[in-house]
Image: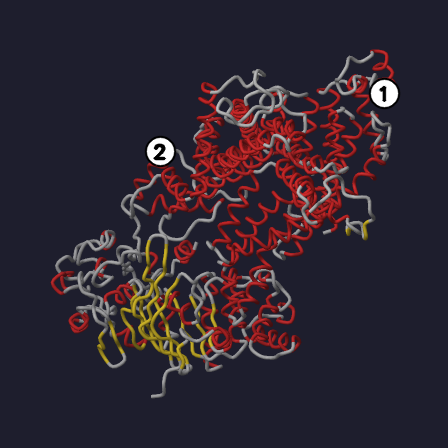
Amino acid sequence: MDENDDLASGLSPMDDANPPGHPGSGPRSGAQDMAAVGHAAGAGAISHDEAHALDMTPEEEANLDRSLSDVGPSRSLRSDAWRRFKRNKLALFGLGLVAFLMVVAVFGPLFVQDPLDTGGISKEKPTNQHWFGTDRLGRDVLARIVYGVRLSLFIGMVATAACTILGIVIGSVAGWFRGWVDTILMRFVDIMLGIPYLVLALAFVAALGKGVTAVVVTLAATAWLQTARTVRAGFLQVRELEYVEAAKAIGVPTHRIILRHVLPNVFQPVIVLVAIGIGTAILAEAALSFLGVGVKAPAPSLGLMINESQSIFTSSPHLLFFPAIGIIMTVLGFMLVGDGLRDALDVKDI
Amino acid sequence: MGTFVLRRLFQLVIVLWGGATILFILFYMVGGNPAERMASGGGERNPNPQVVRNLEVRYGLDKPKPQQYVAHMSRIARGDFGESFRTREPVVDIAKRRAPTSFRLAFWAVIIEGTMGIGSGMLSARRRNSLADVVTTIAAVVASAIPVFVLGFMIKQLTGVYAYQNDWPAWARFPTIGLGDNDWIFWVIPTGNTWKYVVQPAFVLAAVSTAILARITRTSMLETMRMDHVRTARAKGLSEKQVTRKHVLRNALIPVVTILGIDFGTMVGAAILTETVFNIQGLGSQIVASAKDLDMPVVIGLTMLVTLVYGTMSLLVDLSYAYLNPRVRLGDD
Amino acid sequence: MARPLLEVSDLNVEFRTDDGPVQAVRGVDFSVDAGQVLAIVGESGSGKSVTAMSILQLLPPSASISGEVMWKGENLLEVKEPRIREVRGGEISMIFQDPLTALNPVYKVGDQIVEMIQAHGRVSRRDARDRAIEMLDLVGIPQPAKRVDQYTHEFSGGMRQRAMIAMALSCDPQLIIADEPTTALDVTVQAQVLELLTDLADRLDTAVVLITHDLGVVAGMADRVTVMYAGRMVEAGSTDDVFDGTGHPYTHGLLMSLPRLDSDVGAPLMPIGGQPPSMLSPPPGCSFHPRCPFAREDLGCMTEVPATLERSPGHVSACHRADELMADGALDHRRLVGAGRQAADTDTVSVTDDGSAPGTGTEGGGLER
C-alpha cells in the first residue's frame, strides 16, 4: 500500500510521475479502492494480485484489461488464476485425480459387472475374473468400488450443490435486508455451528432414517452454514460500495443488483468452499455409513463396505483396502483442488 | 470484560436452548416413534401395539407434541434431563459416567496435536522447501483425506492384532478396547499401564487436526517472519534465537493456540468415530447409540453437554486471544 | 582528512526471484563522516532501501551482495554473526518506514526498548527501563513514565515514530540509518519528526543516512546527497553542489517537480514523464534514457552505461552529456527559461500535454513559459 500512501501524501514529486489523463490512472484508483475493502492490495502498478482482489463482471474485466494493455501484457483474471493454479503441482495432481474419478464414475459402469450380483465365490482374492476379488456375498469388489465412487461423487456433488444454493440464498437475504432478518438467521447459524458437526449430522440422519436421500438432505442441511456466513460477509462489504450505491440510485432493480454486482464479489470464496465441501461431504457420507446410519445395504457405499469388512479383515484385507483407497483418492482430489483454488484465487480465512 | 463474558454466557444459553429445540423437532416431528423403535428392538421385529402404547404412556409420548416440548424444556431448565428411554438410567448419570473418558481422550489428543502439529509446522517453516517441509506438507494433505475410521482400524489392526500374532516385543503391543480400568491422577494422568490404552485412540483422534495445525503453524510462521517488526528485532542486534522465540513464535502462535482450544472443545464431544473404532465408552459413542434408538432424552442431554463444553472453550479461547493479542478489545462483537 | 565513518564501495545486490534475477543495486559508492547527514534520494524501486538493508545484513537470504561496506576498518559484509549483532543497534541503528508494522504489536513499547538496551550490555531491567523512559522523554513523548507501559496501538503515528527514534538512539549509536522515516506519517507531523531526528543527531553527534524519495526534505537537513535511479547512483555531492550545480538530468527532473516558494505564482510543476523501469529488464545504456529529455542516440545514451565522473571536487554524476548540459546551464532548475535548447522552439507546447508518454521526445523535461 506504500504506493497509495505516496499518492495520498501529495508532496512526493516522483510518484506523481503519472500525469492526469494517463490511461492507466482512471480505472486504477477505482480498482484500489475496491480492493482495499476486503483484501490486501499489493503494492506497485496494477499488480495481478490486486486485480485478483476484485471480482468483476466480464465487461469490467475486459475494460480493465484494455486499460492494462499499455502498461504490461494483458492477462484476464481467469487465466491469471489458472496460471497460478498450474504452478501448484499438488493442485494439478488433485485435478487429475478428480477428472479420473469422474471418468470412472460416468463410464465405469459400462465395463464392470453387476455390483449386486451375488453369483461369485465368497471372499475370493483378486483374480482374472474379479480384479479386486469378491466380497462376503460373492459380489465383484471392482464393480462395487466403481459404483461406490459413483455414489460418493453423486452424494457429494448433489449435497454440496444444495447446500451452496441454500447458503447463498440465506446469506444473501441476511446480508441484503439486515436488521431483524439478519439477526434471526445468523443466530440460527450460530446455534447450528455451536453443535459439533458430526453430532449434528448424526441427529439429522438418525431422525430422517437411512438411505441416500436422507444422507443428501442431512449433508445439505448441515453444511450450508459456512457458505451463508461468507456470502453475508461479502454482502456487508459490497453493499456500501459506490458502484452499488450508484446502481441503486439509478433505479436498477434489487435482484439485478444482487445478481450482477454483489454475487460476483463472493464468487471466489464460494468456489473454494464448494471444492472443499464436496470432499468433506464424501468423507461425512462415508463416516455416517460406517456408523450404520447412512446409506442402506446393499447399496455400494464405500463407508459401508469398510464397516462390513472389518470383522473379516485378517482373512480378506482386500475388502477393506480397496474401498479405503477409493475414499482417500476421492477426498484427496477435492481437497487438493480446493487448496489450489484457495491459493490461486487468494482467498483467505476459509 | 465482565459484560463481555456475561453476554457470551447469555448467548451460550441461547445456543443450548436452540440446539435442544432443533433436536426435539428433528426427533419428535421428523423422526419415527421412539416407543415403536424401542418395542421393535431397533426395527428388528414388528412391535407389539400394547407394548408401544404402554411405553408411550410411561414417557408421556401420547401427549400433544408442543406439550411434550414444554414439559421437557422446563424439566431441563430445572436441571432434570430425564432418563434414558431404553435403560431408564438418568441422563445425568450417563453423562457423569461417560464424560471423564471423553475428557481424558480429548486432553491427550490435544497434547499430541499441539506438540506434533506445532513442531512439524515450525520445522517446515524454518526449513522452507527442504525435504522435511515437502514431506510434512504432503503428509498433512494426505492425513486430512484419510477417514478417521480407516486410520484407527489400521493402527488397531497393526499393534493390537498383528503385533500379538507375530510375537512383537511387549512394548509394541497395545490393548485396543476402552481406556483401561486404572485410576487417573489429577483426572488426566494415567497410572500403571493405562497409557497404553490412551496413546493410540488419542493419536487417531488427533491425526487430522494435527495435519491441519501443522499447515496453519507453517503459514503463520512464514507470514510472521516476513513482517517488519521481525526485521526491526534483527536490526536491534538480537540473536536469531531471540528473534525466533520472542518475535516470531510469540506472534505466530496466537492463532495456533486458539485453534488448539477450539479443537479441544470439539474433541470432547465429537470423537464419535475414534470412540467407535476403539470401543471407548465416551460421550460420542453414546450419542450415536442413543440416536440410532431414537433415545431422545439421552441425545438431547448429551448434545447439550457437548455444546456447553464447546461453547465454554470458545469463550475461553476468545479471552486468551485478547490476553495474547493486546490489540484485540473484548466487547466489540 | 580522516577516514570516513562508513564507506560503501561498489555495492551490488541481486535477488533471485521466480521471474529471474533482479539487480536491485548496481555498483553504488558513498561514504558518511562522523556527525554528518547523508541523504540517499530515489523513487520507489530505485534500490535505496535495499542499499540501507544490506549495510546491516538485513536482506533475506534470496539476496546476494557483493562489494565493500567498511565500518571502522572492517567490512560489514564479511563479519560473522556475533560481531554484526554488536553493530546492529549498538553502533548503527535503523529507523524504518512504517512504525506501526516495525514495532511488535504484542509487546509494550518500553519493553521493546528495554530489549534493545539489554542486548547491548549488561544492564539490569530496572536501569534499562529508566533509560527507556529517559529516551522517550528525550524524543518529546509526554508522560513517558506512563507511555512506557503502553502498546503500539495506543500510540499515534507520529508518537510511534518518535518511540522508534528513542529506541534507535538508546544505545548511543554512531550512525542512524533512517529508511523513509516519515513516508507513513501524516503530512502535519512529517516535518516535526524529521526535525527531531536531525536535531537529536546533531546534539548527540550521531551521523545519519537519510533515505527518502522527497528531495524537498533533503535541502535543509543533509550535508551530502546521493541520488539513485534504477539501482545505480546517478549523482552525488554536497547538497549545495547537487541543488545548485546539478549534474544529472534525473536530479534536474526531481528538482523541477518540486514546489518552490521563490518560483512565479502559477508556474506549473514539472513531473518527470513515464515510469521507472522494471528491474527485471532495465533498459540498456543509461537507465534513465527512456525518460530523459536530453537523451541522444549518437552520444551513446541508449547503448553505453555512462561513467561516473567528477564534475567538480567531491561532486560526481553519471551522464554522457553532463559537462555539456552543465555548461549550458540546462540543468539549472532556478532558471525560469526552459531547459532543453529545443524547448525554445516549441514554446507553445502546453505543459500538461507533454511528458505523458514515456520517452517521446526532447520537450519532455523542463518547459516553462
Residue at the spot of label 2: A59
Relative height, residue A152 to residue B245 (above, below): above
Discs 1/2, front: 1
Mark 2 surroundings within 10 Å by alpha-carbon count, few (fewer than 14), some (14 through 19), many (20 or more): few
Instruction: Write the residue at 81% across / 37% down.
Output: B95
Q: Residues within 10 Å of mark 1 (few under 14, many from 20)?
A: some
Q: CA distance from mark 1 to mark 2?
A: 64 Å
- Of C141 and B19, nearer the camera is B19
- Tell me residue A260's x, y (percent): 44, 30
**Residue A260 visible to an observer of this rendering:** yes
Q: Is residue C368 visible to us here?
A: no
Residue named by callout 1? B60
Residue located 45% across and 77% down the image: C175
Residue A317 placement: quadrant = top right
Tell me the quarter of the image containing the N terminus of chain A: bottom left
Coordinates of residue B215 in the picture (x, y in percent): 55, 48
Relative to residue B236, is residue B76 drawn left or right? right
Kindly identify the amino acid type of the residue bearing the numbered disc 1: Gly
Asked if marks 1 and 2 touch (Cβ < 8 Å), the reply is: no
Task: In the rendered structure, find residue B1 and report the number of the disc placed on it.
Answer: none
Q: Which image quadrant is residue A211 in?
A: top right
Q: Considering the image in quadrants, where does the C terminus of chain A appear?
A: top right
- Name the kind of residue labelled 2 in the image: Glu
Q: Position of residue A253 (x, y in %)?
A: 47, 26
Q: Report the side of C313 relative to B56 (left or right).
A: left
Chain letter for mark 2, please: A
- For label 1, the SS is loop
| Left or right of C115, for residue C43 | left
Chain letter for mark 1, please.
B
Q: Nearer the viewer, residue B87 or A233?
A: B87
- Relative to C35, say whether C324 is above or below: above
